[in-house]
């Protein structure tokens, strides 16, 4: 098993995606409301959801970082995914998030995103991170802005039009919990 760190926030646990998350993960990816803004915008069947999960775990092996399962600390319930991606062909290291519909608009993406950014600055020493947000996904635009993202350009990427938000590390004096 890969050594994927566990990050915790006030309400959330960011932990390795495992087969115990698969049923909930597959259900999230089968939901058109969840997949509307990612990939080709189409829901995934269980077979493709399994491949997605395997790719996300493989990313950790190849890059040393990736996506975490997002769980409520109070119940252990899977509510989505959040993390860092930089697969072949990507423009830069990207912060991304996806929540099950019933957990949106409660601040979870922002809370988790802040933990991931702190990890990226302190553990990976990343010089810059971006988020690609499909134009029209106003909720994710707002999350990126709350995370301190600066809208630097628009980009066509894999057949969709996207806002590109850039995040920059805080000053060196900022304390790192993960250093």
Image (cartoon, rainbow, N blue to C red):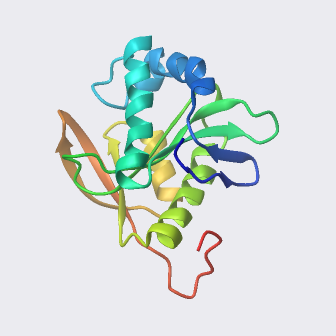
Q: Is residue 39 above or below residue 130?
A: above
- Left or right side of 8 for 163: left
Q: Position of residue 105 (x, y in %)?
A: 62, 38
Residue that protrudes farthest toward the front in the picture: 1
Q: Residue sitting at 46 percent across and 15 percent down? A: 30
Report if residue 31 is visible in the image: yes
Q: Residue sitting at 19 percent across and 41 percent down? A: 157
- Left or right side of 154 for 42: right
- Left or right side of 177 for 149: left
Q: Quadrant of residue 93?
A: bottom left
Residue that protrudes farthest toward the right in the picture: 74
Nearer to me, 115 or 41 = 115
Q: Is residue 11 above or below residue 39?
A: below
Nearer to me, 141 or 95 = 95
Q: Position of residue 91 (x, y in %)?
A: 22, 54
Q: Position of residue 164 (x, y in %)?
A: 30, 53
Report if residue 131 is visible in the image: no
Q: Residue sitting at 82 percent across and 39 percent down? A: 74
Quadrant where the N terminus is found in the figure: top right
Q: Position of residue 3 (x, y in %)?
A: 55, 50
Nearer to me, 25 or 151 = 25
Q: How many marks?
A: 0
- Left or right side of 62 for 46: right
Quadrant where the C terminus is found in the figure: bottom right
Q: Residue sitting at 39 percent across and 28 percent down? A: 52
Q: Is residue 33 above or below residue 61?
A: above
């Amino acid at each position: 098993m890969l050594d994927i760190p566990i990050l915790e926030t006030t309400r959330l646990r960011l932990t390795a995606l495992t087969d115990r998350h698969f049923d909930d993960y597959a259900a999230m990816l089968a939901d058109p409301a969840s997949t509307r803004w990612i990939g080709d915008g189409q829901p995934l069947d269980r077979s493709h959801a399994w491949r997605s999960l395997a790719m996300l775990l493989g990313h950790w092996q190849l890059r040393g970082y990736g996506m975490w399962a997002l769980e409520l600390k109070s119940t252990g319930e899977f509510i989505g995914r959040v993390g860092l991606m930089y697969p072949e062909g990507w423009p830069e290291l990207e912060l991304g998030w996806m929540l099950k519909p019933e957990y949106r608009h409660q601040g979870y993406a922002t809370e988790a995103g802040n933990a991931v950014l702190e990890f990226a600055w302190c553990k990976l020493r990343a010089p810059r991170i971006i988020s690609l947000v499909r134009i029209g996904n106003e909720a994710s635009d707002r999350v990126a802005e709350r995370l301190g993202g600066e809208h630097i350009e628009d980009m066509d990427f894999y057949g969709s039009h996207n806002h590109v938000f850039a995040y920059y590390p805080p000053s060196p004096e900022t304390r790192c919990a993960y250093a």
